[in-house]
Image (cartoon, rainbow, N blue to C red):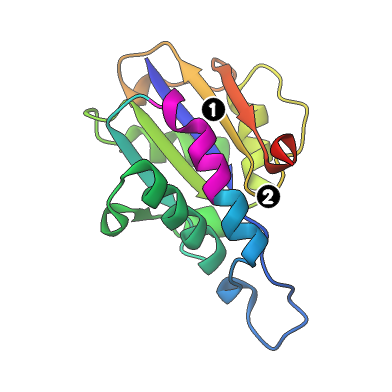
């Protein structure tokens, strides 16, 4: 069994500053929400873990907060540029196929609309919008990451910050 956890970055500062979108940081609320969701999902994650993140500040910072809670080494977070620009389903499956087979769980930190679209493509039906700091886990009954196919996953959990306010 393999578990893919799609995580949308936490709440980020607005873009009306002279800062490029790529460099937007998490707000305090984004930091708190990321930490809370990581704490909530921690007991549901099979070990060992593997992290893949968009290199954009807000996604990487979200991954770092999750890493702190989940005991994952920050320096081991893999950056994937295409998570910022958006991945097709085929590109996403190719990325998953490269996850080390020693890991049974991968957390993928990215942006909308891509994260929501990927949830829709990996599950038979998702039908929601993944909110900031939201996480949807998709279980695949396969032995190898390369064997994952679209629409073959089962939702293991769906957590988002407003559930805990």
Q: What residue sits 64% from the left and 73% below the top?
A: 21
**Which residue is pictured at 27% across the width and 59% down the height?**
75
Q: In which quarter of the image is the C terminus?
A: top right
User: Counting other residues with Cα less than 10 Å from the Cα at mark 1, is it few (<14), some (14-19), or many (20 or more)?
Assistant: many
Name the one closer to the observer, 144 or 42: 42
Q: In the rendered view, does 108 fall on the left or right side of 129?
A: left
Going 50% across and 41% down the picture, which residue do you hit? 38
Q: Left or right: 68 with respect to 17?
A: left
- Return the mark for residue 132: 2
Q: Position of residue 112 (x, y in %)?
A: 68, 50
Q: Is residue 127 above or below residue 39?
A: above
Question: In the image, residue 82 lies at what x, y percent?
Answer: 49, 55
Q: Which image quadrant: the N terminus?
A: top left
Read off the magenta span.
35-45
Q: Is the magenta stretch mostly helix, strand or loop?
A: helix
Identify which residue is drawn at 48% across, 18% down. Answer: 139
Residue 84, image quadrant: bottom right
Q: CB under 8 Å between callouts 2 and 1?
A: no
Q: Residue 132: percent from the left, percent from the top?
A: 68, 50
Q: Position of residue 78 (x, y in %)?
A: 34, 53
Which label number is shown at residue 163? none
Dot 2: element: loop
**Measured Cα–Cα span from mark 2 to mark 1:** 15 Å
Asked if residue 85 shows in the view, the reply is: no
Mark 1 = which residue? 137
Residue at the far top in the pictured view: 141
Q: Looking at the rendering, which quadrant does residue 88 occupy?
A: top right
């Amino acid at each position: 069994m393999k578990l893919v956890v799609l995580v949308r970055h936490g709440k980020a500062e607005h873009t009306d500053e002279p800062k490029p979108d790529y460099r937007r940081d998490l707000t305090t609320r984004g930091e708190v929400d990321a930490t809370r969701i990581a704490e909530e999902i921690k007991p549901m994650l099979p070990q060992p873990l593997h992290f893949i993140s968009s290199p954009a500040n807000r996604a990487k910072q979200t991954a770092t907060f999750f890493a702190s809670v989940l005991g994952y080494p920050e320096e081991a977070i893999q950056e994937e540029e295409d998570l910022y620009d958006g991945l097709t389903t085929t590109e996403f499956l190719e990325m998953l196929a490269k996850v080390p087979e020693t890991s049974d769980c991968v957390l993928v930190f990215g942006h909308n609309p891509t994260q929501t679209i990927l949830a829709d493509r990996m599950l038979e039906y998702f039908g929601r919008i993944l909110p900031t700091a939201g996480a949807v886990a998709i279980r695949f009954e396969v032995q190898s990451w390369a064997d994952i196919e679209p629409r073959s996953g089962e939702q293991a959990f769906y957590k988002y910050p407003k559930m805990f306010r």
